[in-house]
Every structure is written in structure tokens, then in C-alpha cells.
Image: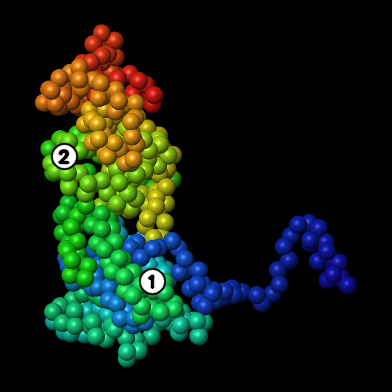
Amino acid sequence: MKCLRRGQAERQRGQMVKHPGLGPVDITPSARRLTGSLRDLGYDFTTAVADIVDNSIAARACRIEVEIVFDGPRSYVAIADDGVGMTAGELNEALRFGTRRRYRSGELGRYGLGLKTASISQARRVSVATRRSARNRRIAVRSLDLDHVASRDRWEVIDPPPGSAINRRSDWLDQGTGTIVLWEKLDRVLPEKRPEGGWARRRLEQLAERAVEYLGMVFHRFLEDEAGHRVTIAVNGTKVHPWNPFAPDEEHRLVLPEQHFEVSVGDSHGQVILRRYVLPPRESFSSRSEFERLSGPLKWNRQQGFYIYRSNRLIQGGGWCGIRAADEHTKFARASLDFGTELDEVFRINVPKMRVSVPTQVRTLLERPVHELSRAAEAVYRGEGSGQDDRQAGDGATGSPTAERHRANRSVVGTPTQSEAARTIGAAMLSAALETGQYEALARILDQVYLTAPDVACALGWSPEGQTARS
């Protein structure tokens, strides 16, 4: 009774009652349950393959080969590289969810989840073979099999079964160091019923084509040797060519001044670099085919905006991150936004490395440069060709007021050669004004020119109606 009254009194005084003998309790999550959740973090096939390629680049690989092999229910996907490889202990750690190893500055890894979560998002078994020593052909091989994890309800890696394709593909490692990641039991890729059918075969063929396109975009700086680490990638023997969204080989591309911003949020400090480009209209491109290629997977309107890079790896391509809306008149505007791993916490990259969140501080710094870029892109757009060409280049937009006004202006200004010269002069004036900080002064001058000689202002790619609508 005394103990009861003492406990009541302590509770009334707001004191916590401690029970003797209760120390830390292990609450390791159910492996069976958690693996089901980890399969649904947002990967699709191409982003999952790209996450494995990240590891290859981090391992200093120069050659990466992706094989997507159709063999009915025994179909598999293999990603092999000639990087530094791993020891047996390092391999076991690499297959741990939330690895304990530390990532180096600039390394493409982030959470210690990519190899595992990317793999199981597509397959029920991931096997890894790796060779660390160039002198000795000592190969470590392990498998993470979700069926085994479910049956034991424990986080365990095992030796691959005798029938696993990893045993046949280890010949890649005969020549030296490297790693092979192999996906089997492709339940998220092939249909559960009839995985041997024609539809399943066509699906793998289509995924191979998409992988070529996606890898060429995400890793274009590594393929072009812009990142100081040149890499070659092939998918089913097809060499992956870089897709650089900024058309560096186009003579009539407009490059605006580069800008650097120092960012400090909490304990994170680093630099963000903004580079801005206006791509030329179709009539000024080197070829029609190149114009179509540079339109990108989503075509011009949806490919405008920011291309955000973390340590030279493209994370997000297209869109204005809420700073402005996509617009037909600014479809040639593209900008790269670069940051390093020291700002990971600031940009909050998701696990599949597909999306970032641009912090408020950075968005505020970007508003004026984006406004300048949009004005420059509008000027180039207003100087674009006429008639049927305008409608085709507009991604479905026909008969826009801007296009109609330009068609009228061409008849006043004169021949196509004269119009081309006027557009070049207008673009050069705009670029010079931006570089010298005299953009607003030039805008006032061109506004006055428009009042007295509207045909001249329009030929230079300027009209108050087009620019004030977004001022």
C-alpha cells in the first residue's frame, strides 16, 4: 500500500517511474515485411540501371556494359564494369541495407541503399561477383534473394544457387578487376503469366532502347569526358552516345554569363553554379535531324528549364522548379544548375536520385537570372521561321499571336537573309547587355524603337507585348 501511494505521489509530481532491470531492447525490423516496402521507393527500370552505373563510376570504371537478356523465366539483367572491385568483406557490406561505410566527397552514392533498393525494385534476386586483385583471380560472389529473406525473416546474403546466371557471367572478370551485378527473377519487369511470351520479349527490347537513351542523358558529362573521368557505356552491344541538352556544337547557340552563388543552410555550405543557354530555332540549327534530336525525350516545351547536376551526374532534367511556368515562347531556354555532395542535405535528393528540392534561398537567388534567360529565349523565339515551320516547331501550338506578328513583320523587313542578319544583331545586343549589366537600359531603348519603328524592333526580336506579359 505504501508503494502504491508513493507511486501515485510521484506521478502527481510529474516524475517518471523507472522499472529496474529494463535496458535497451533490440527492435530489428522484420526483414520479410520491410523488403516489400523497400521495393517501392520510386524506381523504374532505367533509373534502377542508372543507380547501378553510379556505383561503377564510383569504383573508377572506364568501361561499363549492360546486358538485358531474354530467356523466358530465366531472363536476366547484368551490369558489368572494370572498376577496382571489392574484397569478400566489402561485398558483404555493400549488400547491407544502409551500409556503414563512409562516402567520399564527390562520390555518387548517398544513402547506402542504391545497389539493393534499385535491384530489388526490379528483381527478386540480385547477385554480385567482384574481383579486387589484378594479380590473383580471386572472385567473391554473393546473392541477396528475397525468397530466402522471406523464408528466414532475416537479413542474410547467401551463395548463389548453381543455376544462377552469375556463375556463367563471371568470365567478364578473367581479364582483371571489376564487378558484375546481376538481376534474376524479374517479377517487376516480366509478366507473372507467360514470361516466355512474345510480349515479354518485346518489353525487354524496348527497355534496352530506353536504357540507351536515358543513360546517354544522365551520364553525358562522363561520356563526353567533361567530368574528368571518361566512361564508355554499352547496352546489348550498342554504344551509348551522350545527349547534351545544351547543344555545345551549335554555332548559333546563345550563352549567357555564368553565375556562382554561395549557399549556407544550417551546417551545410557550398557553391551552386548556374549556366544559361538559349538554343537556336530550327532554321538556325545545323540540321533538321539535329534539331529533332536535341528536342529531347519529352520534346521542346517539356525539356525547357533546369538541368540539375550533383557531382556532374544529372539528377533532374527540365522544368522550372516553381520559379516560372513552362511556356511555348521560352522552349529554347535551358540552364544547368550544379552542386556538390556537401549540399546534399540542402537539396534533399530522393533515394532513386530522380528528384531534388531546390531550397527557398537558392530559388530566390535564381529568380532574376531566370527572368533574364526567359527574355532572351523569347527574343530568339520571336525571330523563328514562319508559316508551316512555326507550327511544327511549336510542339502542337498553331497560329500563335507571336507567330502571326512575325509573319507580318517578315513582309516588312525584307528577304530571309536580311531577317537572319537582324535576328543575329538583336541576339548579340541582348547578350552584350546582359554581360555588362545594361539589360534594363537596352530594354528601354528598344521600347522606344518599337514606338517609332516597330518593324525594326520586331526584326531584332523585340516587342513590348511579348516581354511585358512576364515582367
Residue found at the very far right of the displayed protein: 1
Identify whether 314 is placed above or below 249. below
* Residue position for label 2: 285
Mark 2 neighbour density, 10 Å: few (under 14) some (14–19) many (20 or more): many
> Label 1: which residue?
189
- Say which of 105 and 312 sits in front: 312
Helix, strand or loop for disc 2: loop
**Mark 2 to mark 1: distance in Å?**
39 Å
Question: Who's the residue at 15% across and 55% down the image?
Answer: 225
Badge 1, how many Cα within 10 Å: few under 14, some, many 20+? some
Q: On the rendered structure, is 444 left or right of 135?
A: right
Percent position of residue 270, x then y: 32, 45
Quadrant where the N terminus lies? bottom right
- Disc on the earlier residue, 2 or 1: 1
**Residue 297's x, y, as percent?**
29, 51
Location of residue 170 by image quarter: bottom left
Percent x, y for residue 194? 40, 79
Which residue sits at x=22%, y=79%?
A: 131
Q: Which amino acid does label 1 sit on?
A: Val
Please identify the quarter of the rendering in which residue 415 is found. Answer: top left
* Amino acid carrying mark 2 in the image: Phe
On the question of residue 121 being in view, the answer is yes
